[in-house]
Image (cartoon, helix red, strand yellow):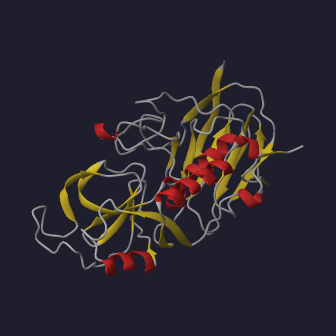
Amino acid sequence: MIRRPVLEMIDPGIQTTVQAWPGRTGILSDGYFPSGPMDHLSFRAANVLVGNDPGVSALEVDKVAVSVAFLAETQIALTGPEGVHARLNDAPVPLWETIRVSAGDTLRTANPGRPGYRLYLAVRGGFDVPEVLGSAATSVITGTGGIEGRALLRGDVLGAPQKEPAVHRRLPEDQRPRFTANWEIEILAGPRATPDFLTDEDWRDLLTMSWRVDLNSDRVGTRLHPHRFRWATGYGTVAGGHPSNVLDDAYPMGGVLANGDVLTILGMDANTSGGFAVVATVPHCALWKVGQVRPGRDTIRFREIEYQEALALNRQVDFTVDQSRVGVVR
């Protein structure tokens, strides 16, 4: 395979990174959260639309605004929020389907203020970046993966393998995720919930309140507005002065962490352990939603589910991005 320059960053926006799914798995004990895309559903769909394996490297664009120039003929796909303005050489192009581009073409995207926060851009063959600890995913916190472990800058050039064109595909509208300003996000209880940490009243608050997403949210964590729980443990335990304090423990991906009176949903670049109670966990099937909430604007309501329902919803998400379900455009 001949690898050649395929894309140059003109304006990388607020933060554009190279990501790969599922990231660095199996090394939590070594201090690495997996990184990878915050919205794995849209990420995998973008790759499938250009004939790639779902997990190969693609771009994650925060706040959906980016401008790039193409240096070679290839195929791309854009996936993300409804209403994104995407223009190729000033002509509008659709999301959620294969797009052919030529050398010299320029792509610009912008969000007119509609719900949704992250856009994904995949190219045929995936981007040619080295794997670090088993993945090309970028962690800007640890300076690992992608391009020098950082967000992309103006003038960065990315390569891709030269491959035969894939068939033109489109994900049907009824299979695309729905974006909103008021999200319902599934959670599993614990590992530290009722009755040992939260009271029954606290758990009811967790499930019935509308949680406002704080402006200071990112790939490390999605912070919610403060709330004073009652706590079953009382104050002043051996772990510390606040009931949310625990002796250091491992954090699960998607954990809903109680940092004092502030709940934080752990993101793909979060800490692997610490001294705060994880009162609930967002399962894999719902993590894509966390990746699309808008800091400072959206709200979240939690819905408790059981393990078997989480597995069923996982299968539903996988079904959506199954290559056999993505329609071929004749």
Q: Quadrant location of residue 212?
A: bottom left
Q: Residue at x 52, y 30 (%)?
A: 129
Going by the picture, which residue comes out furthest to the top? 1
Residue at image position (36%, 75%) is 203
- Tell me the quarter of the image containing the N terminus: top right
Image quarter in which the C terminus is found: top right
For image coordinates 60% across by 29% down, the residue present is: 159
Residue 68 can be seen, yes or no: no
Tell me: residue 255, above or below residue 201. above
Judged left or right of residue 264, residue 304 is right
Position of residue 20 in the picture relative to residue 49 (left or right)? left
- 147 relative to 165 in the view: left or right: left
Q: Position of residue 145 (x, y in %)?
A: 44, 35
Q: Is residue 20 above or below residue 1?
A: below
Q: Which picture quadrant has residue 215?
A: bottom left
Which residue is more in the foreground, 59 or 248? Answer: 248
Q: Position of residue 24 (x, y in %)?
A: 43, 37
Q: Residue furthest front?
A: 308
For this view, does 159 lie left or right of residue 185? right
Of residues 68 and 44, the one drawn nearer to the viewer in this rendering: 44
Q: Where does the image place residue 250, in percent across and percent down from the top left?
A: 28, 49
Residue at screen point 19% across, 60% down: 246
The image shows a total of numbered marks equal to 0
Is residue 95 in sight in this rendering?
A: yes
Q: Picture coordinates of residue 218 (x, y %)? A: 42, 58
